[in-house]
Amino acid sequence: MTDRLDWPLEESREGEDLILFRARYDMRRHPLTDDVMKRIVLQSVDWVNVVALTDDDQAVMIRQFRFGVGYTTLEVPGGMVDPGEDPLTAAQRELMEETGYGGGSWDYLGAVEPNPAVQDNLCHHYLARGVRRQGPQALSGGEAIRLELMSTAAVIEASRSGEIKHALALSALSRVFQLWPLPFLHAGGAASGA
């Protein structure tokens, strides 16, 4: 057994522009066998997600179609950090653009790695308390988003029932609300040995 786990980089080549990502191909040396293997990295700017609460504790949620799964999801507002923009500014901008809500007091909830197996970015989570409607949505041409205000109890129930399945939204929400009793046992996904 060895404690060497890092795969030394031998070579790196830029790949295709995939709109939201840019592919990069890294040639990495296996720490145990010394074999050089080609690995893909999907490069992206950092992302942000916002748990936004009004003065009367309504959560500002959104519904939008997601191409990967092919249906409309329920999630928290969020988006991409523009080049040269700090994550807080991006979070405030995305909340305003997607919902028309802004203001309030903001707290940083930390960051997660969306998928470190193949991605190089972080998703930053924020809590915004006391937000209020400040204007209309300002959606880009590629967005169709419906705003939905939900009680804390409704958000927790949507998480428990599986209506909210977006992993990054659940990660952000779990930093604010106790979404599930522990241990979390989901009735719809029992594994079987047969």
Image (cartoon, helix red, strand yellow):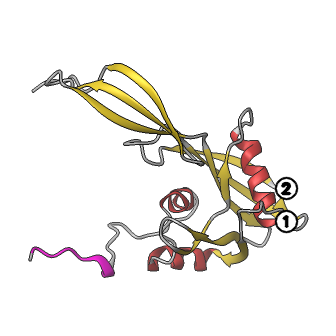
Q: Position of residue 131 (x, y in %)?
A: 81, 62
Q: Callout 1 environment at 10 Å: few (<14), some (14 to 19), or many (20+)?
A: some
Quadrant hosting residue 138? bottom right
Residue at (80%, 61%) from the top-left corner? 130
Q: Disc 1 on helix, strand or loop?
A: strand
Image quadrant holding the C terminus, namely bottom left
Is residue 76 positioned above or below 128 on the image? below
Residue at (52%, 60%) from the top-left corner? 174
Tally of marks? 2
Is residue 2 positioned above or below 42 on the image? above
Q: Position of residue 84 (x, y in %)?
A: 74, 32
Residue segment shown in magenta: 187-193
Q: Is residue 189 magenta?
A: yes
Query: Disc 1 to disc 2, how far (Cα)?
Result: 7 Å
Can residue 98 be seen in this snapshot?
yes
Residue at (37%, 42%) from the top-left corner? 117
Image quadrant holding the N terminus, namely top left
Q: Position of residue 47 (x, y in %)?
A: 61, 47
Which residue is label 1 attached to? Answer: 132
Asked whether the residues under the numbered discs 1 and 2 touch, taking CB atoms below 8 Å apart as contact, a structural biologist would say yes
Is residue 123 positioned above or below 132 on the image? above
Can residue 6 be seen in this snapshot?
no
Q: Position of residue 70 (x, y in %)?
A: 50, 73
**Given the image, on which type of amino acid does mark 1 rest?**
Arg
Q: Which of the two residues, 166 or 181, is positioned nearer the viewer here?
A: 166
Is residue 123 positioned above or below 96 on the image? above
Which residue is label 2 attached to? Answer: 103
Q: Disc 2 on helix, strand or loop?
A: loop
Residue at (77%, 43%) from the top-left corner? 89
Relative placement, left or right, of 29 versus 50 is left
